Image: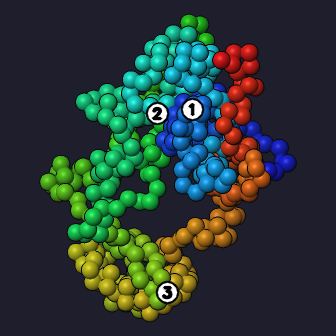
Amino acid sequence: MNAQTSSPIPPQALAGIKVIELGQLIAGPFAGKTLADFGADVIKIEPPASEGSPGGDPLRQWRMLHQGTSVWWQVQSRNKQSVVLDLRTEQGREAVRHLIDEADIVIENFKPGTMEKWGLGFDELSRTNPGLIMLRISGYGQTGPYRERPGFAVVAEAMGGMRYLNAEPGRVPVRAGVSLGDTLAALHGVIGVLLALQARRASINDAAPKGRGQVVDVALYEAVFNCMESLLPEYSAFGAVRQPAGSALPGIAPSNAYPCADGMVVIGGNGDSIFKRLMIAIGRTELSVDAELATNPGRVKRVGEIDEAIGAWTAQRPVSEVVEVLNAVSVPVGRIYSARDIAEDPHYLARDMIVPVTTHDGLTVQVPGVIPKLSATPGWISRRAPTLGEDTERVLGPRRP
């Protein structure tokens, strides 16, 4: 899985699939990265430099930089090629049309209507490439009264219901620290693309030798909302508006973060048999045999008592001891990892989840490995992230504007 290894790349699930990535920043490019990890030939279209702008995807300039380029770029754009085209010009649009005519998938995450304004809408592109699949990621989707509103992940997480819950009771909601709305939308987009590829394959006939393509319409807020579990059913059935609960998981007990002598751990003791083992391990055998606590509804009624018992036990012990004791009796437990913990963890390393890559200017950067892990056609990091326009001449050739 190391881009610097001399080992041959194994067969890949998406080999032969050509993707044109027109999106910027997070959602669209994350989808493109995921497809590229599994062998898709992803050509990323980036804007040229202009007065006041260095050009390229703005992500190149986000967060911590090395010699002017974000190290995050090495994750988001690995396995891709970079072609510089100005889509605001007819020459740039004509060049990208030629690329799209030969592509299987187009990814875009512009404001709805932008592609149509450029003459690059699905209806127009599919006339010359009827097998084309277009992944369209936007804040609110391609239809509906909010479609033209600008939408970022921070707003999607709020509208989708996540931000309301992500807080300590009575305090201001906080964000997760990463752009979950973008990532969830990207993953839903990848699922949609794979479904569309399967449908295209099934539609192959004499009239459609490549099969029929379609639009995959992903809204950021819908991707968040799709992960909100019981939020809406509980409201519709009981009028219950779920409230923030900090590190606890309301209605499921015990599941929380607990203080230790030198830090904190998270413990999930909410399975019936797991709860019994947990109570015995912390010396509260009387709770392990309490009939009311044998099932989740009874534990939920007395969650405060249970959390107090667990917290009293963990507070007297270091994290390492709590983890060792509870792992020994098969109770889910874990310390809360920082970046340092992740980078040094032997399980991450054994699962090839910490992968070194070398940038174009010689910096070695560790990046997350490829998931999911396929046994026969695994994902692979075959090349570093490209410099701006690195592949323009080779990809466009004489059609370069």
Kind of residue sitting beneath label 2: Asn
Kind of residue sitting beneath label 1: Ser
Pair 2/1: label in front = 1
Q: In the rendered structure, which disc, 2 or 1, sits on the residue that comes first in sequence?
A: 1
Position above or below: 27 against 22: below
- The answer to whether residue 338 is left or right of residue 302 is right
Position above or below: 159 against 323: above
Tell me, yes or no, whether the two marked residues, 3 and 2, touch with CB atoms within 8 Å: no
Q: Work out how far the residue at label 3 is from the one at label 2, CA to CA, in angstroms.
A: 45 Å
Residue 375 appears in view: yes
Look at mark 3 in the image and give the residue it sits on.
262
Look at mark 2 in the image and give the residue it sits on.
109
Q: Tell me where residue 146 appears, x and y as whole percent.
A: 27, 33
- The answer to whether residue 22 is left or right of residue 384 is left
Q: Tell me where residue 339 appears, x and y as whole percent.
A: 58, 67
Name the secondary structure under disc 1.
loop
Q: Quadrant of the C terminus?
A: top right
Residue at (58% x, 19% y) in the render: 92
